[in-house]
């Protein structure tokens, strides 16, 4: 194909830019400036990272015992083997234990889980072309909870992430198969099917905990069903961070292929995408990620649903930009939500899923009211 | 363009003369048989078929030597497809010279979209092959096929709010590297801008997709397809839901691209006005193939669509115009109109 200026002779001048007028090598610099030029996007990303680091540090200082930022820094630097950077203030052993054994793992786990769930939601919304897709709404989280509870009851805790992954995968298959009954999978149908599977998974989780009841089973049930980071330890950090790094890297490398689904399967296929293999690859990756996150935190809702919609407004719909930003913002969101969950009604602690639901449901309603395109039917 | 190639696989009127059981159209140049692969070169050399195409379209892009003509363009050879035991396409063969615009016609369910998907390499034919410029499409890797062939399906809607720039940039996906394709691609925007300019839509670059009119959306989709830098453009009912002005300007634009194009169309008159060749499908079989003047004839249309019509020459272009008659409009005998239409059409329709 040759480079041909517009044959119509009109309408070729992009606003403020000469690039469109048959000058193929010229980058359309003016056109880049609007909506998510690389500069503005990088500023958003940088701001989100800074906010995440600062927010996490501040979150560690918040709690029943007073801890200063300097003490947090001193404790972290000490444990990372950087005593030279720790400053002059000696950290009391008790404070050090609170920071390093209790609050740091919890804040880090919150960040990993938030990033993982937000990424999962963004990927699911794209490959299913369903703006309501989310690991929680489509039943993956409940399936993962059920799987996790089964192995906890059986006392084989080391299999926790694997069982949660299996539960998430089974729930995903079940939801998509129910949604497919009687025709194509519409977003509404998928959500209804997900609702059924989520209810089934929750009932199963509750049943198993009751059946094996000993001690405070109500609290345990609530923690699995609503999600809680209260039990976070360094092993939670390990599980969630390995899953996030491994699966997240794979998803980021393939981000461009998610764009191809924007106009549907045929369009993706005509862009050279192996539609079925790609979709299932992404969905299995999401099940892995969700499984790992649920294994350490229970089923936390609405993170994967609302954050992709909010972040798209900043990054644009392209996944090369959307995914990194949504991960960082998801991490920040859950760190803040968990800090609220453990401090607002201090000394009582709420499951963090209550906070995300309080924030997420109004946003969810706004989303439904705002977008009334055919795709939602 | 050699006459042999133009009709090599596409015309075999003697071998199986009937398209529909009740309507004989065996005398027609364009009538095609289900056994068209049996056609013999001897038949073809006696026909004005290939030269007719050249004359009718004024196509200057055809290769000069027969060797190149053998491979250039699109060659459908006995394409067949069945799904769950139901035959969708049966033995469709045709040769579409490079740079020409082909209309893919047929009643609903005739297999137009299925054929387009097979030509695009998205679906595989059960039997038969599609070749583009000598390469068998079914053997190309998906990504390679997407660099050569762009398909626009009908009535697409995006799942998210996005800008025209985002849409056109989708066409660059097949050109990105597999592993690190998520990064880089600085030239992509230049290609996208250029593609928009080619369809006269450069001023739409920063618009939001959902604020565009139907015609503008189709143009942007075509620009997306052009950003793939294809050598073959496939459009599935591109004029659907467009007003008449948008229909005409869109097809005019597609013709002006100079790309080999195949358009599934419902409107026979649009096909007559803008296409160099017509592939007419009926129930998955090739009912006729040829120039609009050869294919769009009352007896063929009656056989395929079951509708009475008269063909009159367009007062300005001389191309055939189909005037349909409903069941109640039978005062004039059909025979009185057809011969006149044949004399007036520009295509060389004289039967041997």
Image (spheres, coloured by chain):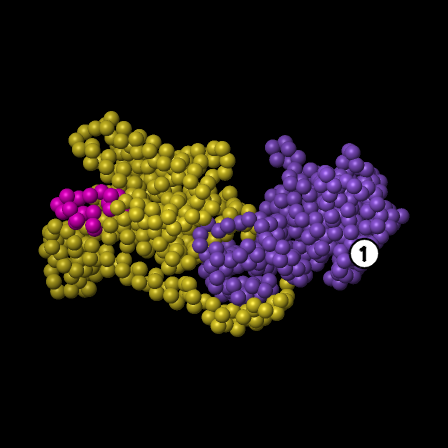
Chain colours: A yellow, B purple
Foreground residue, A212 or A203? A203
Q: Does residue A288 appear in this view?
A: no
Q: Secondary structure at mark 1?
A: loop
Q: Report the chain holding disc 1.
A: B
Q: The magenta stretch spans which residues? A: A339-356
Residue B97, quarter of the rendered image: bottom right
Query: Residue A285: x percent and y percent?
Result: 41, 45
Residue at image position (50%, 35%) is A183
Foreground residue, B77 or A105? B77
> In the drawing, does residue B14 fall left or right of residue A95?
right
- Give the residue at the far right of this rendering: B352
Pointer 1 residue: B346
Residue at image position (67%, 41%) is B107
Residue at image position (76%, 58%) is B315
> How packed is label 1: few (under 14 Cα within 10 Å), some, or many (20 or more)?
some
- Give the residue at the far top of this rendering: A211
Query: Residue A102: x percent and y percent?
Result: 18, 48
Residue at image position (50%, 38%) is A184
Query: Residue A113: x percent and y percent?
Result: 30, 48
């Amino acid at each position: 194909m040759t480079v041909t200026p517009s044959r119509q002779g009109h309408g070729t001048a992009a606003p403020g830019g000469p690039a469109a007028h048959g000058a193929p090598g010229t980058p359309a610099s003016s056109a880049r400036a609007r909506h998510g030029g690389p500069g503005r996007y990088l500023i958003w990303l940088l701001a989100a990272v800074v906010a995440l680091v600062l927010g996490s540090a501040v979150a560690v200082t918040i709690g029943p015992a007073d801890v200063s930022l300097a003490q947090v820094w001193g404790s972290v630097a000490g444990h990372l083997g950087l005593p030279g950077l720790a400053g002059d203030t000696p950290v009391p052993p008790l404070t050090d234990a609170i920071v390093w054994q209790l609050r740091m793992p919890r804040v880090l786990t919150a960040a990993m889980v938030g990033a993982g769930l937000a990424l999962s939601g963004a990927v699911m919304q794209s490959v299913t072309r369903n703006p309501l897709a989310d690991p929680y709404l489509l039943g993956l989280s409940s399936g993962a909870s059920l799987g996790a509870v089964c192995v906890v009851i059986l006392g084989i805790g080391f299999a926790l992430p694997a069982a949660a992954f299996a539960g998430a995968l089974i729930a995903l298959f079940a939801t998509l198969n129910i949604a497919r009954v009687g025709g194509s999978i519409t977003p509404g149908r998928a959500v209804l099917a997900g609702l059924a599977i989520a209810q089934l998974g929750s009932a199963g989780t509750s049943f198993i905990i009751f059946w094996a009841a000993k001690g405070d089973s109500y609290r345990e049930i609530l923690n699995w069903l609503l999600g809680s980071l209260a039990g976070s330890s360094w092993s939670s950090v390990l599980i969630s961070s390995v899953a996030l790094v491994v699966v997240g890297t794979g998803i980021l490398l393939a981000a461009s292929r998610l764009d191809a689904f924007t106009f549907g399967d045929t369009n993706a296929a005509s862009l050279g995408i192996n539609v079925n293999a790609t979709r299932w690859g992404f969905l299995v990756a999401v099940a892995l990620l969700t499984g790992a996150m649920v294994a350490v935190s229970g089923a936390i809702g609405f993170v994967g649903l609302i954050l992709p919609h909010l972040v798209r407004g900043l990054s644009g719909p392209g996944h090369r930009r959307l995914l990194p930003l949504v991960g960082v913002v998801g991490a920040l969101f859950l760190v803040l939500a968990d800090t609220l969950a453990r401090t607002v009604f201090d000394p009582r602690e709420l499951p963090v899923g209550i906070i995300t639901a309080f924030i997420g449901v109004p946003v969810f309603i706004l989303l439904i009211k705002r977008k009334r395109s055919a795709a939602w039917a | 363009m050699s006459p042999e190639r133009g009709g090599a696989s596409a015309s075999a009127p003697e071998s199986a003369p009937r398209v529909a059981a009740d309507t004989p159209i065996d005398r027609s140049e364009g009538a095609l048989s289900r056994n068209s692969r049996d056609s013999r070169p001897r038949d073809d050399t006696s026909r004005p078929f290939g030269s007719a195409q050249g004359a009718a379209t004024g196509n200057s892009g055809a290769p000069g030597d027969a060797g190149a003509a053998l491979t250039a363009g699109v060659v459908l050879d006995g394409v067949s497809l069945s799904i769950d035991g139901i035959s969708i396409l049966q033995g469709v063969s045709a040769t579409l010279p490079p740079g020409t615009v082909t209309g893919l016609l047929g009643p609903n369910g005739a297999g137009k979209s299925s054929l387009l998907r097979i030509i695009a390499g998205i679906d595989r034919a059960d039997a038969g092959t599609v070749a583009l410029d000598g390469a068998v499409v079914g053997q190309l890797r998906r990504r390679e096929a997407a660099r050569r062939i762009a398909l626009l399906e009908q009535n697409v809607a995006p799942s998210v709010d996005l800008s025209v720039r985002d849409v056109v940039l989708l066409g660059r996906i097949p050109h990105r590297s597999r592993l690190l394709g998520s990064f880089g691609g600085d030239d992509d925007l230049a290609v996208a801008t250029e593609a928009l300019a080619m369809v006269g839509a450069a001023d739409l670059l920063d618009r939001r997709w959902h604020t565009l009119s139907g015609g503008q959306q189709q143009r942007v989709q075509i620009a997306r397809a052009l950003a793939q830098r294809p050598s073959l453009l496939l459009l599935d009912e591109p004029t659907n839901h467009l007003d008449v002005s948008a229909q005409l300007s869109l097809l005019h634009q597609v013709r002006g691209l100079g790309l080999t194009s195949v358009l599934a169309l419902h409107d026979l008159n649009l096909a007559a006005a803008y296409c160099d060749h017509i592939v007419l499908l009926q129930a998955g079989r090739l009912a006729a193939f040829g120039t609009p003047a050869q294919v769009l004839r009352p007896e063929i249309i009656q056989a395929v669509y079951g509708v009475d019509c008269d063909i009159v020459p367009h007062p300005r272009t001389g191309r055939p115009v189909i005037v349909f008659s409903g069941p109640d409009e039978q005062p004039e005998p059909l025979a009185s109109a057809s011969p006149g239409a044949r004399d007036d059409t520009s295509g060389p329709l004289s039967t041997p």
